């Protein structure tokens, strides 16, 4: 298929998408209302209707709808082989299939050992009890003593590092120009070069002010924050998604972050959305799923034990996680994901496809730490329905790539490879030292990548980081930040001789205040919470400053040499 044909097909798909959307119905109704106005002349009907729609802001809504579609649908030729379209590399597809079998085996063995069904309908009294304590689900939850997480980041790391391309291995043994990589990722995946990253993150150059960063600059941080807050009001009033996304590249003010994120993602909660969320809640009350216990257990092990998020325990249950497991809309992300949603069969009909159902209904089996994808969002949104749809969007567009095997440039394999290559390029001496003592850097950084730093950074720092994920529409900032942390801790890491010592070295209790040119000391941080970067007493986040000071100077377009 030629490029012209691809473009034509893309336009056909776009028009079909718009015609099937609620926007088309609303726009059609608005056009009828404009045409029925007595001030509109028949001879100028077209011009008058278009003028009325523009004055009503419908042109901006249509532009945003097209922008959102282009963000999620690439102009690629249609593939006859759907599996090849989702993942072109056969060895990664096979590895993902084997990994899925292990997950299902672990889930089924837990069901057998504990004699717990995958799903059952609650008794009428149980439904009433759950409805009465809907806002206090964490106080009287199920018995979780025998429940264990299906898998953790450590298990998934073994799968990622175990990937092998037989063609590549044969080329190595045949004496060709191929070579082994220094790191644990031994498969050649396409990642961006240093020059491409310089251009991509040029807005984060060291001479650019950023919200939440106390870098030394010609403009005071307070003055810059005030100016950005004033500018955010104009951006929100414009209701233009590309403008909001461009604005977020310098960070979002706390007061406007929620609205800016919704504008970037195209989330506008309607009565239909509220009704749909209510249906998900009803499904939770009526049916008990095994994954509910997995989510309960995960929240208990992660968010409840975190000083930043324990207050949101009940909120996490009722607002997001339990309804999320019932949401079949989430299945749409499997259309461009190498993962296959797991299936279950009605009792007595094993192997009969007519009686197969996706389990859980959203197709996602939670891992240890899954709840931390939601926890930081609790600081941004107080409306439960808006919070739910924001999380669902972020999962379906970003987070799912962090726990599935794929050759996609935003996938966990590529992010891991990008981290290793950047660290080798920026600090080869440090990388070789860690390898010599048996401490591959990725074994430390992988859990940061897989959870997008949630639970490892303070909540305000996580939100600053996620600002950039949405602004640049890329997860590659995670790999860059991992490298920045290792560069920042180079002095300590060069002295360690064991893996455990290296892991502790990137979890500091104290960071010299002179690093940011400030006089006041930084507060101590409990090592049990695994914070990677300290928080200032004034509460200012510093991740972007450290990222820019250690790695982005080498990425910046302003860097010489």
Image (cartoon, rainbow, N blue to C red):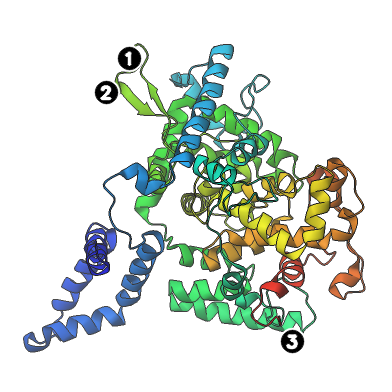
Q: Quadrant of the C terminus?
A: bottom right
Give the image location of residue 515, x and y in percent: 87, 70
Q: Which residue is mark 1?
A: 349
Give the image location of residue 343, x and y in percent: 40, 27
- Frontmost residue, 332 versus 81: 81
Q: Residue extending furthest left?
A: 42
Per the image, label 1 sits on a secondary structure element best described as: loop
Q: Are marks 1 and 2 in contact (CB under 8 Å)?
A: yes
Q: Seen in the image, is 379 located left or right of residue 500?
A: left
C-alpha gap between disc 2 and disc 3? 66 Å
Q: Which residue is pictured at 63% across the width and 45% down the height?
A: 372
Identify the mark nearer the N-term, 1 or 2. Answer: 1
Identify the mark nearer the N-term, 1 or 3. Answer: 3
C-alpha gap between disc 1 and disc 3? 69 Å
Give the image location of residue 48, x and y in percent: 18, 85
Q: Residues within 10 Å of mark 2 (few under 14, many from 20)?
A: few
Observer able to see residue 510: no
Give the number of the mark in front: 2 or 3.
2
Q: In the picture, residue 33 is in which quadrant?
A: bottom left
Res. 219 mark: 3
C-alpha gap between disc 1 and disc 2? 9 Å
Per the image, label 2 sits on a secondary structure element best described as: helix
Q: In the picture, residue 558 is in which quadrant?
A: bottom right
Res. 354 mark: 2
Q: Residues within 10 Å of mark 3 (few under 14, many from 20)?
A: few
């Amino acid at each position: 298929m030629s490029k012209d044909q691809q473009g034509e097909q893309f336009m056909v798909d776009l028009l079909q998408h718009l015609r099937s959307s609620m926007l088309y119905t609303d726009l059609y109704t608005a056009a009828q209302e404009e045409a029925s106005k007595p001030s509109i002349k028949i001879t100028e009907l077209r011009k008058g209707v278009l003028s009325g729609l523009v004055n009503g802001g419908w042109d901006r809504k249509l532009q945003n709808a097209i922008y959102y579609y282009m963000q999620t649908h690439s102009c690629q030729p249609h593939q006859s082989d759907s599996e090849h379209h989702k993942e072109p590399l056969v060895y990664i597809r096979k590895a993902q299939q084997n990994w899925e079998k292990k997950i299902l085996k672990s889930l089924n063995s837990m069901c057998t050992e504990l004699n717990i069904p995958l799903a059952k309908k609650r008794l009428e009294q149980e439904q009433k009890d759950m409805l009465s304590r809907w806002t206090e689900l964490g106080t009287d939850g199920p018995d979780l003593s025998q429940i264990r997480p299906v898998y953790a980041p450590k298990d998934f790391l073994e799968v990622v590092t175990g990937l092998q391309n037989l063609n590549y291995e044969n080329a190595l043994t045949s004496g060709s120009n191929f070579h082994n990589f220094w790191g644990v990722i031994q498969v050649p995946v396409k990642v961006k070069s240093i020059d491409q990253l310089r251009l991509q993150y040029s807005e984060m150059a060291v001479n650019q002010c950023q919200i939440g960063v106390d870098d030394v600059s010609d403009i005071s941080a307070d003055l810059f924050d005030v100016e950005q807050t004033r500018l955010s009001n104009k951006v929100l009033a414009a209701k233009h998604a590309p403008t909001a996304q461009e604005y977020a590249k310098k960070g979002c003010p706390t007061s406007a972050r929620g609205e800016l994120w919704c504008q970037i993602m195209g989330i506008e909660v309607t009565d239909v959305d509220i009704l749909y969320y209510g249906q998900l809640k009803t499904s939770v009350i009526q049916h008990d799923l095994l994954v509910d216990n997995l989510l309960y257990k995960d929240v208990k092990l992660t968010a409840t034990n975190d000083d930043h998020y324990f207050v949101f325990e009940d909120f996490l249950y009722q607002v997001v996680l339990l309804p999320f497991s019932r949401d079949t809309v989430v299945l749409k992300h499997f259309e461009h994901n190498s993962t296959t949603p797991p299936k279950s069969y009605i009792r007595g009909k094993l192997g009969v496809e007519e009686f197969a159902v996706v389990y859980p209904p959203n197709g996602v089996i939670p891992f240890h730490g899954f709840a931390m994808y939601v926890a930081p969002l609790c600081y941004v949104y107080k409306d439960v329905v808006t919070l739910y749809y924001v999380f669902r969007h972020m999962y379906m567009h970003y987070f799912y790539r962090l726990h599935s095997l794929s050759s996609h440039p935003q996938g966990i394999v590529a992010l891991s490879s990008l981290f290793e290559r950047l660290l080798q390029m920026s600090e080869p001496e440090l990388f070789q030292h860690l390898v010599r003592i048996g401490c591959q850097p990725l074994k430390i950084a992988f859990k940061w990548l897989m959870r997008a730093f949630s639970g490892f950074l303070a909540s305000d720092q996580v939100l600053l980081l996620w600002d950039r994920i949405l602004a640049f529409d890329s997860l590659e900032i995670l790999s860059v930040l991992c490298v920045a942390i290792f560069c920042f801790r180079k002095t300590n890491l060069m002295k360690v001789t064991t893996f455990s010592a290296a892991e502790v070295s990137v979890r500091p209790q104290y960071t010299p205040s002179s690093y940011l040119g400030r006089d006041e000391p930084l507060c101590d941080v409990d090592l049990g919470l695994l914070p990677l970067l300290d928080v200032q007493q004034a509460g200012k986040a510093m991740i972007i400053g450290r990222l820019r000071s250690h790695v982005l100077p080498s990425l910046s377009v302003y860097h010489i040499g």
